[in-house]
Image (cartoon, rainbow, N blue to C red):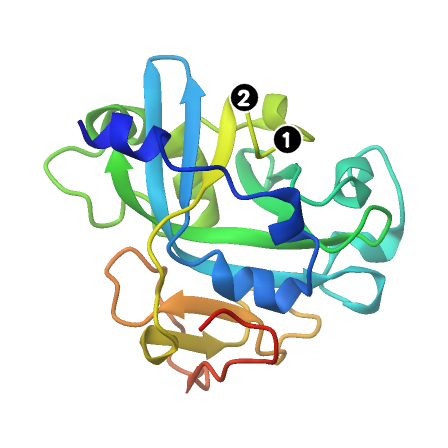
Amino acid sequence: MVGRANRRRRALSRAFFSRDTTLVAREMLGAILECRGDGGVTSGRIVETEAYLGGDDPASHAVVGRTSRTEHLFGRPGNAYVYFIYGRYWCVNAVTERAGRGHAVLVRGIEPVDGIDLMRARRGIFGTERGLTNGPARLCLALGIDGRLNGVSLQRGPLVLREGCAIPDAAVSVSQRIGLTRAADWPLRYYVTSNPHVSRTPSAFSVGRYAAAPGARS
């Protein structure tokens, strides 16, 4: 029942993604990331994101320009950019703003909703949901997201971002991004405060409360 209810939710439009990347990163919190793949449908509610700001962001893949790896990062807003790290893991992003800019939002953590047993089997974790999807590589393993989905539309097909529940500003925390050496102090990580499916915040990080920007949803 839960899965069918979520699939009745509308996909987020390209207009949603064609806005300021930091605003999209904040407003993706609460949206449902759904993947149809081998074994069935899995999905989760997004609880953690990071914004990457194109060629002006030293931590973004866009700084190297268009390459075979980054081609889809420069694609249409509302498409997926899926990349490989450490020779073994995948990470999934939503392309934002406009084609050619290289802006995107990394999905860092989701709260499992549908297909939880399948997620556990893929991760080899049983009897718990904690630690199942708190991190970009972990959630991709759990949902079955890999390079075959690089460049696909997030409005239809095997990978969809759907409308979810609104997260109030008071429940959103902001910190610098995790695991970076360049632009490491930029406060572009957004997450649902105290949610157990958010990746661990390093103790040295400065964490603040989200302040709504002009044009944000009320």
Label 2 is placed on what type of residue? Answer: Gly
Hey, which residue is sitting farthest top in the picture?
Answer: 38
Q: Vertical placement of 183 versus 132: above or below? A: below
Horizontal side of 59 relative to 84 (left or right) equals right
Q: Vertical placement of 143 versus 135: above or below? A: above
Q: Which residue is label 2 attached to?
A: 157
Which residue is rendered at x = 53% and y = 43% of the image?
Answer: 12
Which residue is rendered at x = 33% and y = 41% of the image?
Answer: 44
Q: Which mark is residue 153?
A: 1
> In this orientation, which residue lies closer to the viewer: 209 or 20?
20
- Using the rendered view, name the quadrant where residue 75 is placed: top right
Q: Which mark is residue 101?
A: none
Which residue is rendered at x = 33% and y = 13% of the image?
Answer: 39
In percent of width and height, residue 116 lies at: 22, 31
Q: Residues within 10 Å of mark 2 (few under 14, many from 20)?
A: few
Q: Are marks 2 and 1 in contact (CB under 8 Å)?
A: yes
Where disc 1 sits, the SS reads loop
- Using the rendered view, name the quadrant where residue 171 is placed: bottom left
